[in-house]
Image: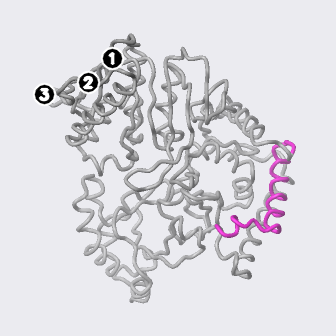
Amino acid sequence: MPTPDVAPSPAQLHGIEINEYAHELAHTTIWIGYIQWFVQNGFGFPPEPVLRPLDTIQQMDAILAFDKKGNPIEPTWPKADVIVGNPPFLGGGKIRSELGDVYTEALFKLYGDRLPNFSDLVCYWFEKARAMIEQGTAKRVGLLATQAIRAGASRRVLDRIKETGSIFWARSEQEWSLDGAALRVSMIGFDDGVESQRMLDNQNVSNINADLTTSVDLTRATLLEENATICFQGPSPKGPFDIDEEMAQRMLQAALNPNGRPNSDVVRRVVGAAELVQGTFNRWTIDFGLMASEEAAAYILPFEYLKHTVYPVRSKNRRASYAKKWWQYAEARSGMRAALAGKRRFIVTPRVSKHRFFVWLPVDVLANDRTFVFARDDDYFFGVLQSRLHEVWSLATSSRHGVAGDIVYNNTTCFETFPFPWPLGQKPVDKLKVQAITHAAQVLNKLRDDLKSTDPHYDTLTKMYNEKPEVLMIAHRRLDAVVFAAYGWPVDLSDDEILARLLALNLERAESPEN
């Protein structure tokens, strides 16, 4: 701290900014703040020139540099007592498209042993700051992050922070405005573990977990092998594969192709999150699955359509595999297609939605990358997914999206860690309990269909779950009761008690020799 008769200098403040305009603006902002402090604390007015250069504010990339040979290296951050900042918000899936292949590959190569590829961009700032604390060149850090840092690949950086230090202050959800858009962020303060007081969302707590919760530490949950190869994100097109009703009917009504096959093999209805929520199925797409180009070309109208609409886009894609197989969905999800083979229907849920609900779809409909697909066709499985136990678990293992805080489901954190009453793939211990869940799930599903078809007020699932009519809640309570019974647990457990029991079951299953 400065003595009362000596004013501190702005030179004690270091900064990094890559944008030239923002770099200059930072200098001016710091001097304005310094002058205000100088005057308000009785030091008079600073000598001229009032605004002087600040060599401590560097114009450079904060997370990536290159040596003279072009190899990626980490930029050196100045030694500091406290690091604060608002790193740029960019989702992991958009890094390549926004920053380019060269930058992205260099970033992945440099941090690959510390951060999963496709972590949100802010995670690199967190990792740099964490490393400085570990090395003793910084003491405390306070940074903003996207909500996604609480789950999935991005949460790995918070796991690392907990391994080498501690989170002592956090806001798990905070409304924020960026470029005029409203969104929700997380705010996180961490150190080497020396701070004994913890505060989460303005409440004193004894501990803050890596997912920015304080009760049951679900970051300990393990992926269960029994749940693998069941839940998949839907195929991602990366191009204009969708067609309107008129074009779809033209292709469907065309004569058989030279291969003797109809276009209905590859012209399919497609749904995303919006269609699931609204209950509308009027979009079509051309889906060649995993077909080779020679096989796809035999479907004359669909292939020629994609040749004129998709090829100009995908042939220029920077990812070689996308450009090479331009007639296929970019991420065709071969595992999903194999898992769905032979099934007449499957379960799907929106990737992002206000309410977590599950819907049956016939296997001839394609659910796209705005959804998660479950390769099961039994009502028992559907019933457990739609129960309160899975809802509580998925809410606790999800991130949030947008200012409304919509729930982002994740196939790994939400599903592959969730323990069913009996391990999937194993013979149930009690067939009567399976039958009870099956019946309750069928009743619930039929009731939702009946409400939507008979009452215009409930023409979408969002309206239905916003309003929560008592007849629907009764069906849910009956389903919950039989699912709780299958676990052998009382139905009146609190959310924290549910999470604690499910976590214990997850860890027990993970330790089983069969996993």
Examine the rendered structure and indicate whether residue 134 appears above or below residue 475.
above
Amino acid at pointer 2: Pro
Q: Is residue 53 left or right of residue 428?
A: left
In front: label 1 or label 3: 1
Q: Point out which mark residue 55 bears.
A: none
Magenta span contains residue 372 = no
Residue at 53 percent across and 41 percent down: it is 151
Residue 155, percent across and down?
A: 50, 36
Q: Is residue 439 visible?
A: no
Q: Residues within 10 Å of mark 3 (few under 14, many from 20)?
A: few
Give how far apart the Cα atoms at labels 2 and 1 are: 10 Å
Query: Along the horizontal axis of the image, is 465 left or right of 35?
Result: right
The magenta segment: 462-490
Which of the 4 image quarters holds residue 37? top left
- State the image quarter where residue 448 is shown: bottom right
Query: Which mark identifies residue 46?
Result: 2
Does the residue at mark 2 contact the one at mark 3 (Cβ under 8 Å)?
no
Q: What secondary structure predominates along the stretch shown in magenta?
A: helix
Residue 69: which numbered mark, if any?
3
The one of 297 and 416 positioned closer to us in this rendering: 416
In this rendering, the answer to whether 414 lies above or below 254 is: above
Q: CA distance from mark 1 to mark 3?
A: 45 Å
**Label 1: which residue?**
7
| Numbered disc 2: secondary structure | loop
Residue drawn at (38%, 10%) of the image: 3
Amino acid under label 1? Ala
Element type at mark 3: loop
Instruction: State the image coordinates of residue 103 (x, y, percent, origin top left).
Output: 24, 40
User: Which type of secondary structure does the marked residue at label 1 adopt?
Assistant: loop
Q: Earlier in the sequence, mark 2 or mark 3?
A: 2
